[in-house]
Image: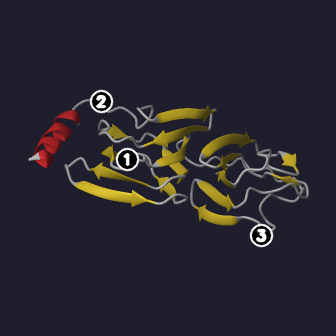
Amino acid sequence: MRWMITAAVLFLLQALPLPPAYPRAGATKIFENNRVQVWNISWLKQQYALHRHLYDLIGVYYTNGDRIIVSTEGARRPVSTKAWDTAYQLRGVTHVEEGASDSPLRAVFIELKEDAPTALVDSATTPPAFTGGEGKQLRDNERAIMWEFVPAPAAGAAHRHMRDAVTVAFTGATPRVLYVPRGTVHTDEGIGRADRAYIVELK
């Protein structure tokens, strides 16, 4: 019976303008500029409204947790996610989400505000970042490159960021976000002694 009610509600709501995924209860915007907006998200134990993701997104989960994803046809899909799994999702996804664990799933998601990749690459001769093997490349797709550092990278030789980048550093379960413009030359990532860091280079 519950799924029939959910399906009926979804059918009716699809005729209305849909809200974006964020902001919503449990989601806090922690950075925004002309290229990205970054959200610190908790999937609280409740059902969220039917929504549409307006932007491509990439991010990392930093706690374990469960949720239920409800399709526009009313199909319910339980999902369990582990801390430090990563996500990449194209814009246009429309669904309902429910937090399903007492301790909520948490993530930092970077929404990519531009419709397509932008050819913004610095080509100066300073050694580029992330070529020394100290980080692990997790993703490389049409919109971004994601690197993982455990622990967070320490100071080293000077390097240049060839692309705009978003750094998400974690000390315990507390995230901190920095934006690094392309062309930046430095010897460390400016995040101090964090436990781990994820650096997303924007295409």
To which residue does mark 2 refer? Answer: 17
- Asked if residue 52 is positioned above or below residue 65 in the image, the reply reads above
Please name the residue shown 76% across and 42% down the image.
181
Q: Nearer the viewer, residue 50 or 35?
A: 50
Residue 91 drawn at (x, y percent): 43, 46
Q: Nearer the viewer, residue 183 or 177?
A: 177
Residue 49 drawn at (x, y percent): 30, 35
- Asked if residue 149 is positioned above or below residue 51 in the image, the reply reads below
Q: Earlier in the sequence, mark 1 or mark 2?
A: 2
SS at badge 3: loop
- Which residue occupies the extreme bottom position in the image? 133
How far is disc 2 from disc 3 in space, using C-alphas? 47 Å
Q: Nearer the viewer, residue 76 or 185?
A: 76
Q: Find residue 53 and report its image quarter.
A: top left
SS at badge 2: loop
Please name the residue shown 80% across and 44% down the image.
190
Residue 37 drawn at (x, y percent): 57, 37
